[in-house]
Image (tube, grey):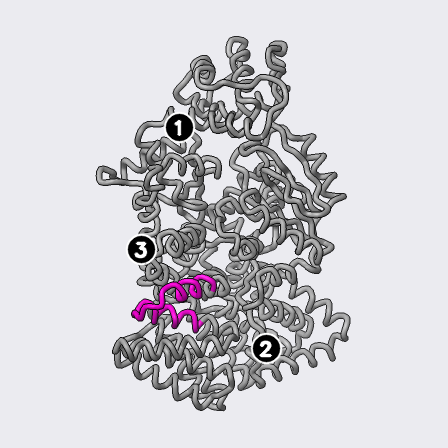
Amino acid sequence: MPADLTTFVGRRSELAAARKLLSDARLVTLTGVGGVGKTRLATQLARSLRRAFADGVWIVELATLRDETVLAQTVIDALDITEGSTRSRLEVLRDFVRHREILIVMDNCEHLLTAAATLIDSLLRRAPGLRVLATSRQALGVPGEHLMPIRPLPIPIPGKMPESGMSSEFAAVTLFVERAAAVVPDFVVTSENEPQIVQICQQLEGLPLAIELAAARLRVLAVGELYASLSHRFTLLTGGSRTVAERHQTLRATVDWSFDLCTGAEQKLWARASAFAGTFDLEGALAVCGDTTSTAESILETITGLVDKSILAREEDTGRVRFRMLETIREYGESKLDPHSRGTEVRQRHLAWCVGLVERAAQDWFGPAQERWCIRLRTEYPNLRVALEYCLTELRDHETGLRLASPYFLWMACGSLAEGRYWLDRALALSPTPSIVRGNALWTNAFIANTQGELDAAEAMAEECRSLGGKLNDQAIVAAGNHMLGCAGLFRGELAAACELMESALEDYLALGIRTDPEVNLRFELGLAYLFTGRPDLAFEQYDYCRRVCDEHQAPWLLSYALWGIGLIEFTRGELHSAATHVREGLLLKRVFRDTLGLAVVLDTLAWITAADGDALRAATLLGAAAQQWKTFSRQQLFGYKDFVAQRERCETQARRQLGDKEFADGFSRGAKMSIDDLLTYALGDRAVPKRPQPPVQDGASTSLTRRQREICQLIGDGLTNKEIAAKLVISLRTAESHVQHILTKLGFTSRAQVAALVAQQRTVSSNPLDGR
């Protein structure tokens, strides 16, 4: 749930009514004009209902989404489902919610009305435990939908002034006063300004967004001046029935007025920043919103002005500051772009910035910045999607689209395999011209298809890649094609041919100086081929080489695979303790990445080791978790490889024999329902003893924790909530939450589960970086 940055004012009756509606109905839609507070009310309601839904409350923000074809994927991302299979996105969602008690908030549905209604209807029909709370400017039209119109905040009756001191009984006035105090710390209601405050709220018709924008002006205007400005700029309806369109016009007039009070530089940046989707940072603003006269200092000053005027909202996450515009504000800014060019120059700058960002990530990927890039790229996904759509449709620069979508780590380590296939399939179909860029895209797409188990498609793309390399006289593209053909052969069970192709590709990579990332990827797959052909010593050599190279370059993602491979070989040799250590080390490294394949194979292997070590219930839970990951990812668990499948069946048989069918089924089901964070915490647990790798934090971050923060780390490791921590340490809940956020920032983490896993790890070693010694 997103954290509140400001107080929630009023709406008690609406909250009670919506809560009652949602207890009776499975779909409730909050409707109303833009800026009336639908999103804030929905968030507040969802937060109050968290304990009523055993499997969680989730918010899906749709305001920045333009392409309805990725609506289901957007919901998958919001629900944190690690899914990369070739099944339809709708099928994946149906399967996920089918047996869960869950509330999903679908926020800002109006611009995707048909697609959102279709998806919600389909999910509700198949998941009896699902409730949906939607916000939209109009009804979705889904059977069983209950509508709840959201009105503006209560205001005193126009023309009738409340008794002195009684205006605070009206939520609109309370909101204005609280927001005014936020920008003018010594602001108070007096007998002199109270009538003007009431009149301002009346003129703004109780619309929360309009009130907040107006209150922000008190930084430079007195209440009387503010009232006079509003009176001058708006022609307001003061009574009778009004249509939605007219209310919408009132909101636009409010934003018009706010725009007029901005400086010329602020107006330009506001308009240009509308090219961003979701959020953006200072770096992005410099690239997209500046011009020949702009400097970093001037852009920062202009952004500061827009933050002060409540046009931009400041957010901070993992040590980086980003800026967000409300969708209404973004749409208004977009309307202020050059009407003749439709903002073409700004959108092309945005595209160029996205391409540059991805190319910088590719240069840095195999190194110590890998985790930071993963987090950064996931944050920028809304911007990358907008850039790809613009590139492939309006601009029709299809080769640039290929460049933007081609880096394999975008989809294999940071995002969704299915979404990667979607963009690459589109770009490849639109850009058939032979080129190195096309060859790279074919390699990535074949890589994804192989991983999904779509071997025919993978082979076709790998063959084209190899053929294209021949036509271009580019041996690197030929080698890449052989690499992917070898992978397809590996998963088909054609092991001799697979080894030959991959060994040939490896020779070419080494001869051409193609090292690190492609080489390690290939050696990992070659190690599997050696293992499958009964040559574990050769496989161990490949994995040990991968480990050393990844260690040297501090590249954790492929290091996690190398450690898994080593642990797998040790398991086949009966070295259970060492196998568990290496597999858990690999799992710990995956905590930042969205790596469905890696998570699936590690959980399966860890289940086998756990069963062999005698813990049947834990093995059953891990088997359930692994099965769920494979189900969301590939048509065949463990690629259908017979030895792996046989090992999994032996593990299940052994666990069932010890537990009995019912207890096994309960454990299996529990594992299948776990969130990714819960899975990582459980799988690492108090036995997770990865001693070798240190957590990838900023230099000195762990030892820079204060004594109080180290104490809170230990309490998180004990499983205490923020509220329980506050009670134990006799501090306020807000102070506890602040400490936890600072801890996450310093450690470079994104969740409490990661802190708990780190504490569990470090409690088993003699030197604990969290104890300050």
Amino acid type, mark 1: Phe
Q: Secondary structure at mark 2?
A: helix
Residue under the point 43% across and 38% down: 314
| Of labels 1 and 3, the one closer to you | 1
Q: Kindly identify which residue carries mark 1.
A: 259
Q: CA distance from mark 1 to mark 2?
A: 63 Å
Which residues are drawn in magenta?
A: 422-447
Q: Kindly identify which residue carries mark 2.
A: 609
- Disc on res. 356: 3
Amino acid type, mark 2: Ile
Residue under the point 62% across and 63% down: 91
Name the residue nearer the viewer: 495 or 233. Answer: 233
| Image location (x, y in percent) of residue 658 | 73, 78
Circle 1: is it few (<14), some (14-19), or many (20+) Cα within 10 Å?
Answer: many
Would you say residue 327 is visible in this rendering? yes
Main SS of residues in magenta: helix
- In the rendered structure, which disc, 3 or 2, sits on the residue that comes first in sequence? 3
